[in-house]
Image: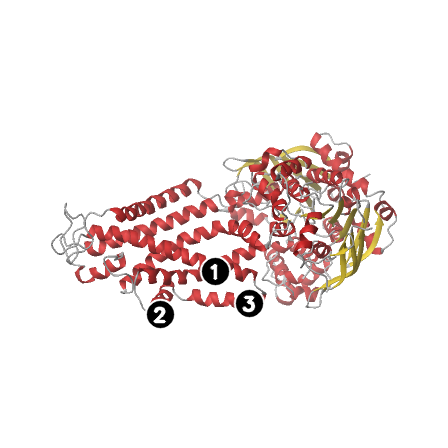
Amino acid sequence: MSLLKVDNVTFGYSSGKSVLAGVSLDIGPGDTIGLVGESGSGKSTLLRLLLGLTRPNSGSISFNGTALDPRNAQFMRAYRRQVQIVFQDPYSSLDPRQTVLSIVAEPLRSLKIAGDHRQMVMEALVSVGLEPTILGRYPHEFSGGQRQRIAIARAIVAGPSLLLADEAVSALDLSTRIRIVELLKQLSASMTLVFVSHDIGVVAALCEKIVILEQGRIVESGDTKTILANPQHPYTQRLLASVPRMPA
Amino acid sequence: MSALLDIKQLSLHTENVRLLYGVDLTIAPGERVGLIGESGSGKSLTAMAATGLLPTNIRASGSITLAGRPVIDASEHQLNLLRGTAAAVVFQEPLTALDPLMRIGRQIAEPLRRRAARDGQRLSGTELDAAVLAMMGDVALPDPERIARAYPHEISGGQRQRVAIAMALACKPSLLIADEPTTALDVTTQAEILCLLDRLVRERNMALLFISHDLPVVAGIVDRVVVLRQGEVVEAGPVHQVFAHPQHAYTQSLVAAAHAFDTALGAVP
Amino acid sequence: MTTLDQIAAPNRRRRFGSLTLWAGIALVGIHIAVGLLTVVWTPYDPSGMTGGRLEAPSWLHWAGTDRLGRDFLTQIMIGSRIALIVGTGAVAIGAIIGVTLGLLAAFATKLLDDAFAATLDILIAFPTLLIAMLVVAAADTANLGSAIFALGIALSAIVARLTRILTKRVLLLDYITAARTSGTSWLGIVFRHILPNIWPTLSVSFALQFGLAAIAEASLSYLGLGAPPPNASWGRLLQEAQGTVYTAPIGAIAPGIALVSLVIGINLLADGLRDSVDPTRRAR
């Protein structure tokens, strides 16, 4: 049974502008899926729908067989324990006025998860490669890469089964980028990962399956290596041809 | 032939922070050089220094010569004469590089008119309009008449960057400085803009200083590369050589990272 | 933020920044000390006639006496207490009402919010003093309480507008979305994330409003709409000094200096506060 099932979802604004048209997706437990799209592809909206922050105009999203109902507070609390997200900008995704402990422990507090929060936070920090002694420090004391690790620690502290990543490495330097990708790869061994990005190189390095979005529609999807070797849809071909390559 | 841009032992610092240290960089007319660095490397600062556009609280030592004229400690008047004619800059974020309240046509007309004035010609009225449309054609902007009447927020990111390039080219510079010109753009748009830059620079025999943190992008457009790390040059040389056989540990790690993503993409189509 | 952005931001005169702050703290501190002192002790009984009328400053009466023979220094000192009470009270009322309204507006639907913003802009167009006068007139009593309340109402419009715009800005940031996906309720988000982040800018505004309230209260009293003696504020003293300003100038100079010193102190304090709250300095 799939972990997260998106069934023929559409989303558009009242002004008539359509953002997603008939998108269907099947995410199985343990998958690492890359969602590739450029601006206007609807990938950000799709993420918001998966997080229950907005509702689709039509179609449904179900998690472990149960339909996603953002208005049901109890359901959402259980859902948020299972589904977490890492954002793109490490400079605006951490509250500058809170300590690292407070930031990473927020899901534990808000979702009323039992246990020693401090201990759980320290374990999460260690698993993302940070020192557990940084609990009392503030975001501005850290670099972009370190902040992103803190954001990842926050996302995994409640032990979710699905981790969403919205351009999680796009704002990072090349050398930091590769390290965070390695971290995510490591984490994806124990959870399902959906990685949204415009950078097909990063997606190729990280994800086993790939889904290509263009203007609100899925134009191609399947096994990463297969699609890279033999892209069928003209948009995918154009995308691959546009990626700058290293000289041989 | 004397160098177009000659930076010797450039050091930049504020009261308590050293930003750049002992940087050497030379660009001959028609030459294409890439400046590679991550955030904090000082690559943008180097470009700003070359055109005398550093903030006032940064002190510079060493020497910078642009088109034979000194830049450090030059007067605003002398610098103004150099800017545009000797070097023009294309920045990373096209949305903020354009005046949001001015129509595109007028924004391109400004540098065209000024450059003509410097050459001793008067360009105005229908002649100016024609020159603007011609310029827009050079950067392959579709539907030039409609775009000339539009405002920056009404056109796409790729189109805005083409406008920014048009404005830089309108100055007829000997050196085009491009500071991460495609970083904020989509992959497919990036490929188009890089292609455009490559063609224009070649057609007009301009020198190019291309600043970026994206190694494959740089490899495709320059001949020589300089690698900056935290304000110091760690390696320099022909781009294919540096990428194939990086000498410095930092360059090696950058190249390895770039290769990791590149290899994942599989064979080149 | 690129390195260039961080450096290009004007390096606020750090050394002078702390000087401003300390000068402000010193001036305001003096008034606070004096005000607190008057609660337990004054040089003379405030309503007692302890000297001749309109005496010049002397060793017995450092600031002379008023037209009824009461010690003038005592009156000035009490004025500090009044000014501080009014300032604190007005800013507090303005803050509570203004922040609440501002937060509600930031979360409201577009239509409601636009209407609210327009109303606020109209209100702010009226001088604070005028609104305060209207409220006092409507309340039909002229005492300390009504003055504080009136000023609070007048200030709340400024606070509401500022809160609204700051909140809207914060709501766009990723850490708010992160809080939502962490399961935090909107109320939790307001108290844990929004208020702490808008507080620095708001606090500078409050400091400035304090000065505004002090002057507005003095104006109300000068016009006879403030508290009557012995709770007389500096404004009232200035009004009483009108007739005798040539024969006993101390009557106008002393309250004037007191008011000016407090307001300058507050403005210096706010200036110093703003520098320490400046995000470009925090970024380093």
CA gap, disc 3 to disc 2? 28 Å
Q: Amino acid at mark 2?
A: Ala
Label 3 CA crowd tier, 10 Å (few <14, some 14–19, many 20+): few
Q: Amino acid at mark 1?
A: Ala
Q: Position of residue C95 (x, y in %)?
A: 44, 56
Q: What kind of element bears circle 1? A: helix
Nearer to the camera, C45 or C122:
C45
Position above or below: B233 against A54: above
Q: Earlier in the sequence, mark 2 or mark 1?
A: 2
Q: Which residue is mark 3?
A: C112
Q: What kind of element bears circle 2? A: helix
CA gap, disc 2 to disc 1? 22 Å
Q: Which residue is mark 1?
A: C160
Q: Position of residue A68 (x, y in %)?
A: 73, 57
Tell me whether marks 3 and 1 sit on the same chain. Answer: yes
Q: Position of residue A8 (x, y in %)?
A: 79, 61
Q: What kind of element bears circle 3? A: helix
Nearer to the camera, B152 or B205:
B152
Quadrant containing the C terminus of chain A is top right
Residue in the picture at 50% in, 41% down: B57
Q: Amino acid at mark 3?
A: Leu
Name the mark nearer the viewer: 2 or 1.
2
Callout 1: residue from which chain?
C
Q: Which residue is mark 2?
A: C138
Q: Earlier in the sequence, mark 3 or mark 2?
A: 3
